[in-house]
Image (tube, helix red, strand yellow):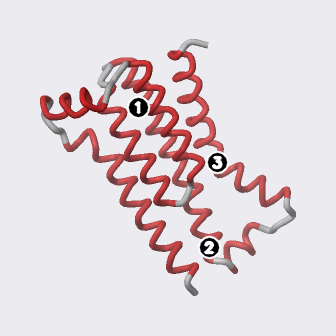
Amino acid sequence: MTSKKIIEFIFNLIIVVFFAYPFLLILYTQFLGIDLQKLISMDPYWNIMFIQSFITPFIGFYILQLKERLANDRKVETIILQLLVLAIGFLIMGNATFSITIFILIFYLFYYWKIKIKDFQYIFKKENFSFKDYLVPLTILSIAVIIRIMLNLVSNT
C-alpha cells in the first residue's frame, strides 16, 4: 500500500468509527445484557460516557471536512495542527484509542508530505494566524476539558 492509500484508509477508519461510536456503545451494553436507561439513570459516570459518545459523530463529521479540505486546499500544516488539537482533546477526555489513531494519522501526514518540525515552525511564523481555522478544534478542546471535569467530579463521589 502506498502512503496516500494508508492516509485515506486511516481517515476513513476514523470517520466510520466516530460515526458508529454511539451505536457501538448501545450494542455493547445490549450484548452484556445491561439496560442502558437504568444504567444511565443510576450511574452518573455512564451518563457522561453516553454524552461523550453522542459528541463523537460530530467530531467525525469535522474530520470528514478536514479530509475534503486536504484534498482541495492542500493546507497540510493547518490540518495537522487541527488534528493535533483534536488528539489532545481526546486524551483529555480519556479516550486514548481515538487519540492514538489521530496521532498515527498525523505521523503519516508528516511522512507523506515530508514535513519536518523545523519547517512546520517556519511555516507558521510566515503565515497569518486565522482564528476561524481553529475555532472548531478549540471548541472541541473546551468540551473535552468540561467532560474531564465532569468525570473527575463523578469519580470522586
Q: What residue is rendered at 28% in x and 43% in y?
A: 134
Q: Nearer the viewer, residue 34 or 83?
A: 83
Q: Position of residue 48 (x, y in %)?
A: 57, 68
Q: Nearer the viewer, residue 134 or 122?
A: 122
Give the quadrant of the N terminus.
top right
Circle 2: residue type: Tyr
Mark 2 near mark 3, Cβ–Cβ under 8 Å? no
Sequence-earlier tag: 2 or 3: 3
Sequence-earlier tag: 2 or 1: 2
**Residue 37, located in which quarter of the rendered image?**
bottom right
Q: Position of residue 96 (x, y in %)?
A: 56, 52
Q: Which label belongs to residue 21? A: 3
Q: Measure how far apart labels 2 and 3 are at the Cα level.
A: 17 Å
Spot the residue most to the top: 2
Tell me: residue 136, above or below residue 120.
below
Q: What residue is rendered at 42% in x and 46% in y?
A: 86
Number of residues whose C-alpha sits closer than 10 Å to that of mark 3, classed few (under 14), some (14–19) or many (20 or more): some
Q: Measure how far apart labels 3 and 1 are at the Cα level.
A: 19 Å
Mark 3 near mark 1, Cβ–Cβ under 8 Å? no
Circle 1: residue type: Leu
Q: Which label belongs to residue 45? A: 2
Tell me: residue 133, above or below residue 138.
above
**Residue 152 horizontal side relative to residue 78, left or right:** right
Number of residues whose C-alpha sits closer than 10 Å to that of mark 1, classed few (under 14), some (14–19) or many (20 or more): many
Sequence-earlier tag: 3 or 1: 3
**Residue 58 horizontal side relative to residue 70, left or right:** right
Residue that mark 1 sits on: 66
Give the quadrant of the C terminus.
bottom right
Q: Position of residue 38 (x, y in %)?
A: 75, 75
